[in-house]
Image (cartoon, rainbow, N blue to C red):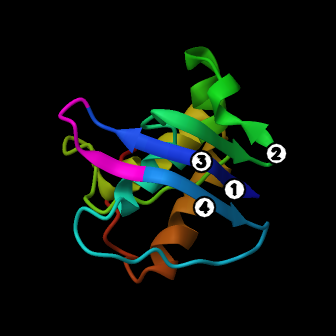
Amino acid sequence: MIEFKQVSKKYPTGQLALYNVNLTLEAGEMVFITGHSGAGKSTLLKLVALLERPSCGDVLIGGRSLNQLGRSQVPSYRRRIGFIFQDPHLLYDRSVFDNIALPLRIAGMGQTETRRRVQAALDKVGLTGREKPSR
């Protein structure tokens, strides 16, 4: 479950991206976030990913307040969520295979399972044969 309770986000420039947002998304619920440029869509997602913190209010994930998470707990929290950026954030000195495999390796997954999962992901998006895996 994702819950926003009276969440506002004001940037140092003075721009108010979100104001007093109350939102509840139940587990398994699918939503589409739409709106004009500057409406706060990206800010809302950045708050869920803890790339930003709210100026006021509370964001809860699974009933737990993200305000309670310290800096050292953020990496562990982020391993539990999936986030696809609008702009690709790739390591240009690495192959497609290595970019996909990186979070799996960081999580301690073995080489065989990592290779299997990377191949499955590439197949799912029609990029099989483009991975150029490093040996």
Marks 1 and 4, how far apart in space? 28 Å
Range of magenta residues: 12-18
Q: Which residue is mark 1?
A: 2
Q: Residues within 10 Å of mark 2 (few under 14, many from 20)?
A: few
Marks 3 and 2, how far apart in space? 15 Å
- Type of amino acid under label 1: Ile
On residue 63, the disc is 2
Q: Which mark sits nearer the N-terminus, 1 or 4?
A: 1
Cβ atoms under marks 2 and 4 closer than 8 Å: no
On residue 117, the disc is 4
Element assignment for label 4: helix
Element assignment for label 1: strand
Whether residue 133 appears in this view of the structure is no
Q: Residue at left 59%, top 77%? A: 31
Marks 2 and 1, how far apart in space? 8 Å
Percent x, y of residue 83: 49, 55
Percent x, y of residue 134: 36, 47
In which image quadrant can residue 92 be found? top left
On residue 6, the disc is 3
Q: Residue at left 51%, top 37%? A: 50
Q: Which mark sits nearer the N-terminus, 4 or 3?
A: 3
- Type of amino acid under label 4: Arg
Closer to us: 19 or 81: 19
